[in-house]
Image (cartoon, rainbow, N blue to C red):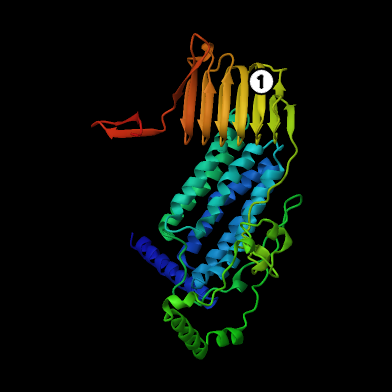
Amino acid sequence: MAELASLVQRLEVAVGRLEAMSVSDSSSGGGAVAAYIEAYDEILNGPVAWYISLSQEIGGDVQKHADMMNQAFRCQKQLLLTASSCQKPSDAILATLLQPLSKAIEQVQCFHAKNRMSPFFNHLCTVNESVPALGWVTMAPKPGLYIKEMGDAGTFYANRVLKDFREKDKKHVEWVKAYLSIWTELQNYIKQHHTTGLVWSKTGPVASASAAPPPPCAPAGGCPPPPPPGPPPPMDLEQSSRASSGDHGADARNLLFASLNKGSDITRGLKHVSDDQKTHKNPALRSQGGPGPSVRTGPKPFSSSSSSPRPAAPATATCKLSPVLELDGKKWKVENQEGEQNLVISDTELKQVVYAFKCNNSTLQVKGKLNSITVDNCKKMGLVFDDVVGIVEVINCKDIKIQVMGKVPTISINKTDGCHVYLSTDSLSCEIISAKSSEMNILVPKKDGEFTEHAVPEQFKTVWDGQKLVTTSTEIAG
């Protein structure tokens, strides 16, 4: 036992010497690494590496998307390295430091927009909806809450991946777990190291634009990043100093006070304008130019060309896509329809589904009996269908009207503003499930063929009854 205790003591001494040497080497190489950099590396080497590995196993568009996400995480780490050794710069320099991360996020979103026909489109949507969470470095004072909201947005499509592959390929189930764990770990990381916003160094030099890494290269087939904004116009210091000199300001003030001291005589020098010289009483003067050299009919509207150019903020590239109405396997795709009022799907089967995406000012009629219908990101769209044995989903839409001609067991309304559902006599037992939506109305038929409108509650009251929470709908007092 004495020999074992001696061995343990020697090992502790050796470990202490190795740790001291590690700190010494890191200090001589440019200063000790901040604690939150090491914690961020744990995320990169943990859930991010797990997600990248599974994406490579799946391959295809999922792997390409993961490579872009990896680049975005690397850009964020570079920004964290700058913040750990430098003080916070001005807003203009900070915008320059954020450009690589912003363009990496833009590439991820543009790849999603270019590959809507991908067999892994739900995977791409999962990443596309949550990748803005990397912008937490600009959020204050609650960046952790922002990450949670963005992560929840991606969870919706992640559940679709689970639904499609739970019984087919467990690898995709692991992929969902790995990806969602990134945002969970990142939220915990922010709570520990950046509770109220990105933490900058207090002692280092002020960060400069030269610390920003080069922006990532655009992938093949992707949208190129926008050009950098031009430099501001030079300032004429001599002219501005002459304009603001003390003598000139004193003379101007003296003239102003002298005019005010005239009292009612201040208007004596004004010339009377007769009615035949007034442009508002003689419209002909407006076209002829009036008696004078020029006649102004009102103030000029603001023109951006007369002012100095303002650099535009980088925005997600918008891609114009052609309309689609086709059967792909068991899925009817109705996409990018504009102003089409006679869209009809008639040759349907029980195993088929309908997916309508980005259709505006259009009407779709689905005949026959089929599995399910999904309306995603549509505006001012009408949907008429006969029978659905599964569910009708409305997601991220505005001003949608749905009419049920036959039967449907469930209608789900999520993140939608304005939805009118006309039920048939056979579908009165339909369940309406809503979340994060407003202006929802259900119209129930009467015996005379007219409809009675009923509003779906949007406000709720929750109380504790001593054992559990009890939630009931409430009405806003008018």
Could you say which is closer to the camera, residue 122 or residue 448? 448
Question: Is residue 127 in sight in this rendering?
Answer: yes
Question: Could you say where residue 64 lies in the image, as x and y percent from the top left?
Answer: 69, 48
Question: Could you say where residue 371 lies in the image, as x and y percent from the top left?
Answer: 62, 20
Q: Residue at x 71, y 18 (%)?
A: 346
Quarter of the image that includes the N terminus: bottom left
Question: Is residue 71 in sight in this rendering?
Answer: no
Q: Name the amino acid, label 1.
A: Val
Residue extending furthest toward the left: 466
Residue 229, quarter of picture: bottom right
Question: Could you say where residue 456 lies in the image, as x and y percent from the top left?
Answer: 44, 27
Q: Which residue matches tag 1?
A: 366
Residue 354, quarter of picture: top right
Question: Could you say where residue 335 lies in the image, as x and y percent from the top left?
Answer: 69, 34
Q: Is residue 349 above or below residue 138?
A: above
Residue 216 appears left or right of 192: right
